[in-house]
Amino acid sequence: MAEILAGLSAVLAWPVLGFLAIGVCLGAVFGALPGLTATMGVALLTPLTFWVSPEQGLAMLLGIYCGTIPSGGIPAILINVPGTPASIAASWDGYALTRKGQAGLALGINALASTTGQLTSIAFLAFLAFPIASFALRFGPAEYFGLTLLGVSLMAGVSGGHVLKGVLAGTLGLALALVGLDPMTAYPRYTFGMSEFLDGISFVPVMIGLFGLGEVLVQISDRQSAQVSAAAAIGRVLPRIADAKRMARATFSGAAVGTMVGAIPAAGGDIGAVIAWEQARRTSSDGDSFGKGSLSGLAASCSACNAAIGGGMTTMLTLGIPGDAVSAILIGALLIHGIQPGPLLFANNQAFVFSIVFLMIFASLLIMVIGILGAKPLAKVLSIPAPWLWAGIIVFGTVGAYALNNAVTDVWAMYAAGVAGFLFRKTQIPLGPLVLGLILGPLMESNLRRALILSRGDWWAMLTRPILLVFLAATLLSLLWPLVRARRGRAKRSQDTIPDA
Amino acid sequence: MTAPPLRWILAGCLFAVGCSGNEESYPSKEIKLIVQASPGGASDMVSRVMASLAEGHLNVPIVCEYKPGASGALAFSFVARRPSDGYTIGHAPVEIAIVRSLGYADIGPSDVSLICLVSKTAPALVVHPDSPWQSFDDFIAAAKAEPGNIVMANSGIGSIWHFNILLLEQGTGARFTHLPYGGSAPALVSVIGRHSDAAVAAVGEVISHVRAGSLRALAVFDAGRAGVMAEVPTTHELGYPIGAPAWSGFYGPAGMSAERVAMLADAFKTAFETTEWAEFCRELGMEAHYLGKEDFAAFALEQQRFFESRIPQLVRLENP
């Protein structure tokens, strides 16, 4: 208890709270601009913190981290361009809500569910850090393979009813993920002799192109200015109590899924949100509305991608190993300030751990206030005349694609993905599976091959690992569930028709 | 959008002509420092700390830009194509001496103007603290007794720490099963989680885990002991003179004038001599080590010859 109070009093100082607020605001800007990610924001501002006290520096960096992810949902909802990869799943239901004229409500849910997700994961960090961390450490190559296999099996679920086309897009995503150095032998694959391709297809530019430019091209070709004027209706921001109650289950189960996935090194909010969304869809009584503007779907994905923050921090603080790219940079920043993350930090400097917990709580409450107050002004973006909005998206998309690695190749990748995204939309091939394949492909391939190195090439030996078996069972369930539901649906329909008969 | 408008190019040419007549005015505008990695890693931290310490001496800002990819080959080729006016320079890691041997790009230390070297980082061999191997000799004896039984995680095939593992195999006759990861952090995590038995990574990357007791260091691959891990023996002491360190230096496009190279080298030397730099190197487990233009060039070329001669041999060793 004394440590909790000491941790609280260390951060209840105006300079610390000031730096926290600056960080949250900067994070909000970074998140809202596609191409500028949380990783980049934290990395670029880390050196600025060398000259201030550890609490102040950490306040700013945590503020950026907690501010970026919720604000990445804003462009995902308003213009269907995820601000960071974590918000991909949020765009599925969020943008659908905007098209229904409920942009304000979508932004409000984003703010509320994001903060709920963050606060839930912070509670996990404060009370269950070591059990979560030891679970995360049990993830070896075979377990990662299981997790990614489950992720890939969700392709059908995110296909929006076009399962065959979804599988086609997903396979294309997996194929694109093969480009670059072979993860095991470092042999260049499909690089056409260009060093630019050695590291594979850059994911963020492809995401900006598929979602941003692709959407713009579709709207231009459809002369869809009608959509914008319909969407300019912002509607209410805060959900009704009844809606909030209905979303609560999806929000909290999303937070639990996000925390666990975030705690596992190398898996972050993007994967967590997709898994949480699919899990919410499957367990919902109204699963068919997911992807078409479901409030629960939006809440689950927003909550999960934010809960991954607390999960990643848990692994970082307890084990000294990064849970994701941002916490990898935070470790470096802490070392510079002479603080050593790891088990000893909890034993020797518990007050500091609680300082981090309180900083994250304050940051996540602040971003919620910003998100709710900002919802109406931000949604005004939609009343910008369509051609201006299109031009803006193309400009920001181009800048964002270039800013990621300062590489012109990425800009071309973004344009190519934009054209592909346009053609996909016109032929009703869903984009979700393609993105899943591209994110999960490298993780799945390298971990399967690592698992086979460890089992000396024996496929059956891999099956002795319990966590892997759980994932395989879940994968099987997710593949068979649509069949089960279809049968149930038929049964129900035939029941319904009895009175008529 | 990739090419600037013609009038800017013309303005730039006029400006360049104006500058070239007036050698002592260098530097008169910001200097771009191209970093071959993403923000947040060791290369980035070295570059930014050095830039911030050196820019006061030059009276112009030094701004870091990032061009990650292909082990740095993209950044090296980019800098080599810039005008050699000293306003675009780059961070030179050990990979500048390796990428040609790996076939990633036809560029090496002899194709650029080397400025100076500022730090070195030795690798260390680590195992899980609950493992049976208390010493380097235990470990090597076990690896020899059952070749291929010990799983050795590395930070990627072709990375500098992977070479050190191959040098270890070649120098001791031990054989491991190699488990490649996409960097040192995941490789170390796999040892901490007991998914693999051992790993080789930079002293600075393992020190925090060694201090926390989640990893045990068996040897540092160097001639002298590492300042932050003075209790760990070196491979040279143990009778195996092996080890290829990572290093950090700076370079510009080929054909930079000797005066400009000297001015930059002086500025970095001043930065090198500050207590901040010594402190920074200590925190990150690196060795502050300065080599001027000539010494750096000799060292980098010798490194390139070393990798050119060893890489084919080591690759054969791995795929017999």
Image (cartoon, rainbow, N blue to C red):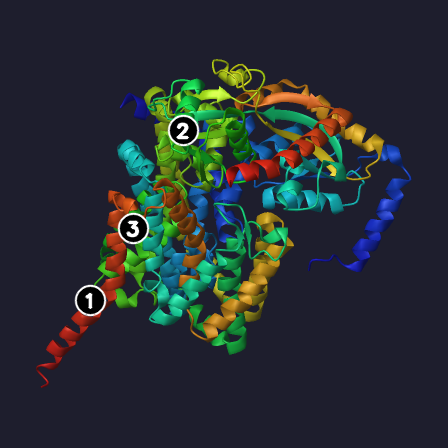
Tell me: A417 left or right of A481: right
Q: Earlier in the sequence, mark 3 or mark 1?
A: 3
Discs 3, 1: same chain: yes
**Label 2 vs label 3: CA separation?**
29 Å
The one nearer the camera, A20 or A273, is A273
Q: Is residue A33 visible?
A: yes
Mark 2: amino acid: Val
Looking at the picture, do discs 2 and 1 lie on one chain? yes
Q: Quadrant of the N terminus of chain B?
A: bottom right
Q: Which residue is mark 1?
A: A484
Q: Secondary structure at mark 3?
A: helix
Badge 2: how crowded within 10 Å, few (<14), some, or many (20+)? many
- Please, which chain is the residue tagged with disc 3 on? A
Q: Position of residue B191 (x, y in %)?
A: 39, 32
Question: What amino acid is at disc 3?
Answer: Gly
| Side (left or right) of A12 relative to A215 | left
Looking at the image, residue A304 sits to the left or right of residue A192; the answer is left
The residue positioned 44% from the left and 25% from the top of the image is B126
Q: Is residue A48 above or below residue A267?
A: above
Q: Which residue is mark 3?
A: A254
Between the residue at mark 3 and the residue at mark 1, the CA separation in whole angstroms equals: 24 Å
Q: Nearer the viewer, residue B120 or A397?
A: B120
Q: Which mark is residue B237?
A: none
Q: Position of residue B7 (x, y in %)?
A: 81, 57
Q: Kindly identify which numbered label has been placed on residue A11.
A: 2
Residue B125: x and y in percent read: 47, 25
Name the quadrant containing residue A160: bottom left
In the depicted view, which residue is nearer to us: A50 or A178? A178
Identify which amino acid the numbered label 1 is placed on. Answer: Val
Name the secondary structure under disc 2: helix
* Residue depicted at 16% across the width and 77% down the height: A493
Q: Earlier in the sequence, mark 2 or mark 1?
A: 2
